[in-house]
Amino acid sequence: MTPQRHVSRIGQVFSRCAAEERAAFIPFIMGGDPSFEVSLDLMKALPAAGADIIELGVCFTDPMADGPAIQAAGLRALAAGQTLTRTLEMVARFRQGNAATPIVLMGYYNPFLAMGVDAFLEKAVAAGVDGVIIVDLPPEEDAEMCLPARAAGLDFIRLTTPTTDMDRLPAVVRHVSGFVYYVSVAGVTGAGSAASGVVREAIGTIKTAARLPVAVGFGIKTPDMAADMARVADAVVVGSAIVEKLAAAYPQGLEKVPPDPLHSEEVLNFTRALSAAVRTARQA
């Protein structure tokens, strides 16, 4: 299959942010955590809270790259009955009121394989998905999902890490589109942090190989940390810290707290603070 060439919603976001001389802000939430309705309400509110792109997690039983916070979020979502089909339904319902904000699904290959790649891509395009990150599909398996996704008009985004071999990097990014997601620490989500100077050097290397925007994530927990990365990266991704705020908003689970979107207000306030830090980082 020949990948389609088009300016995606993701590409439009990065063009706009470049014109505004700022980084993009990408919050992550787990689809279905702590319930379908609460998660959907939060997703709908994220653009007004400053999200340029939304990364929506697809829950899976064995999330090998995720730290405790996102693992727990996935288990809460699974317990609430979330599936890949329900996650696509979330995107479709989000699109009823928002046609502009890009949605990137992030997950592991098993749920997509179980649905069937062709069936998933058809449903994803119909729902309004813009891109996918499949954590456990290496470039040697690009024919499995990467190339079909590109041919269907979806951006395929891949992770690179501090341990990615430089000789291997061109193969890692050869077929990707939208952006490259640089994991700034060697470890699972939510672990540690990286110095901006080290990240700046890595971003330069990645851009030489991929000629795409680079988003930085993993280990970014505060507005100050987000601003630090926004000075060197094209986008900043925050996941575990947001997921932890959501878990704190529902400490007893939904059986004790009504599924009222107002309970997510602390999450949105935190998201606004992160977004403001990212948007103004280069003005200082």
Image (cartoon, grey):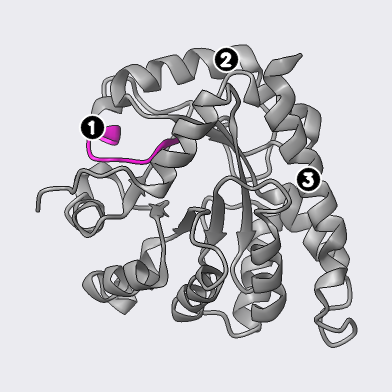
- The answer to whether the residues at label 1 and label 3 have Cβ atoms under 8 Å apart is no
Within the image, what quadrant is residue 283 found in? Answer: top right
Indicate the secondary structure of the residue bearing disc 1: helix
Residue 66 position, x and y percent, is 58, 52
Packing grade of label 3 (10 A; few <14, some 14-19, many >=20) is: some
Front residue of this view, candidates 52 and 135: 52
Circle 1 residue: 171
- Of pointers 2 and 3, the one earlier in the residue sequence: 2
Front residue of this view, candidates 138 and 125: 125
Residue 10 position, x and y percent, is 43, 45
Q: Is residue 246 above or below residue 87?
A: above
Circle 3 residue: 272
Within the image, what quadrant is residue 167 found in? Answer: top left
Report the side of 205 relative to 103 (left or right).
Answer: left
What span is in magenta?
Answer: 171-181
* Foreground disc of the pair 2, 3: 3
Circle 2 residue: 198
Asked if the stretch drawn in magenta spans residue 93, the answer is no
Q: Residue at x 31, y 42 (%)?
A: 7
How far apart marks 2 and 1 lie (CA) works out to 22 Å
